[in-house]
Image (tube, helix red, strand yellow):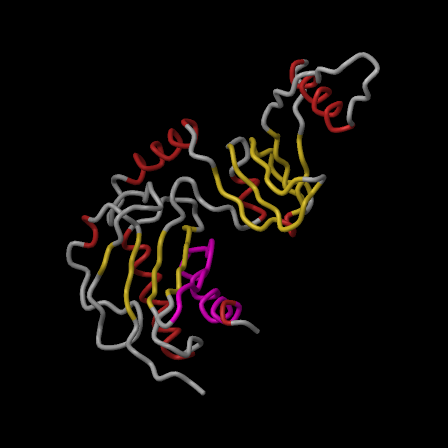
Amino acid sequence: MDVLARIVEIIGPSVEAMGYEIVRLQLSGGQRPTLQIMADRADGAAMTVDDCADISNAVSALLDVEDPISSAYNLEVSSPGIDRPLTRLKDFERFKGFEARIETEIPLDGRKRFRGVLYGVEGEAVLIALDAKTAQAPKRKPGAKVSAKAKAEAEGAAAVAAGMVEVAEVPFGHIARAKLEMTDELLAVAAAEQGLAAGVEGGAMDVDDDARTVKRPKGPKGPGRFSGKADAAAEDSATIEAQSPAKPARD
């Protein structure tokens, strides 16, 4: 079992019991790596600074005991942001009707990148309506042969002109990465959610993956343990970053 799988096994049940879902888990860096936990509220409400702090406190306590990372590391807990990554099959159903980018691990029908409006899921496949094709009928000399690709593109353009939509079925298991596209429609929905969250104690929804990181002083030991929460609710980002104490490397 690799390190990330072990960490999920350790923290997953507790995070879910607290009313949150892990969206993405990453371990990056060299001598002092960073464990990044991206989480959502299970009830669909906007994440707040206090939500991230609660997750960080709980996770750091569990990792202190189980010690799955042999070296010193940083712990970072954040919300997904607006143009969030899509990591679970249900994410593609939840954000049906919004534009997204999908990249697959292997070529599917000659392509690895898909961009368009999500049409939800069907079984284990993600449905995405591809961008309208603008290919024109190829110019050729009389008697010249038209390539199959050029013919397909021309037919695709004719189908779009007739009001038909080309929908691709992308097997979820072949998706390497996917994320929502920043559009006016997505911003409008996020703004509405932020308005609903504005009155929630602890702060408003994180509206940018690049939002300023909230740093809190670490406690006597363990990553993510804080000596206090003063002024945390006033911050405008739902991101918490803490540092673990140095640990001796294992043989």
Q: Could you tell me which residue is drawn at 63 percent across and 41 percent down?
A: 126
Say whether residue 13 is magenta.
Answer: yes
The answer to which image quadrant residue 170 occupies is: top right
Q: Position of residue 180 (x, y in %)?
A: 48, 39
Above or below, comparing residue 143 to residue 247 in the picture: above
Furthest-front residue in view? Answer: 141
Query: Where is the N terminus found, in terms of image quarters?
Result: bottom right
Say whether residue 192 is magenta.
Answer: no
Out of 97 and 154, give the one closest to the viewer: 154
Q: Judge left or right: residue 120 versus residue 28.
A: right
Q: Could you tell me which residue is drawn at 32 percent across and 43 percent down?
A: 205
Q: Position of residue 94 (x, y in %)?
A: 53, 40
Q: Could you tell me which residue is drawn at 53 percent across and 68 percent down?
A: 5
Query: Where is the C terminus found, in terms of image quarters?
Result: bottom left
Furthest-right residue in view? Answer: 143
Q: Position of residue 128 (x, y in %)?
A: 61, 34
Q: Position of residue 96 (x, y in %)?
A: 55, 35
Q: Give the range drawn in magenta.
A: 5-30
Above or below, comparing residue 63 to residue 21 in the picture: below
Furthest-top residue in view? Answer: 142
> What is the tally of numbered marks visible in this picture?
0
Furthest-bottom residue in view? Answer: 251
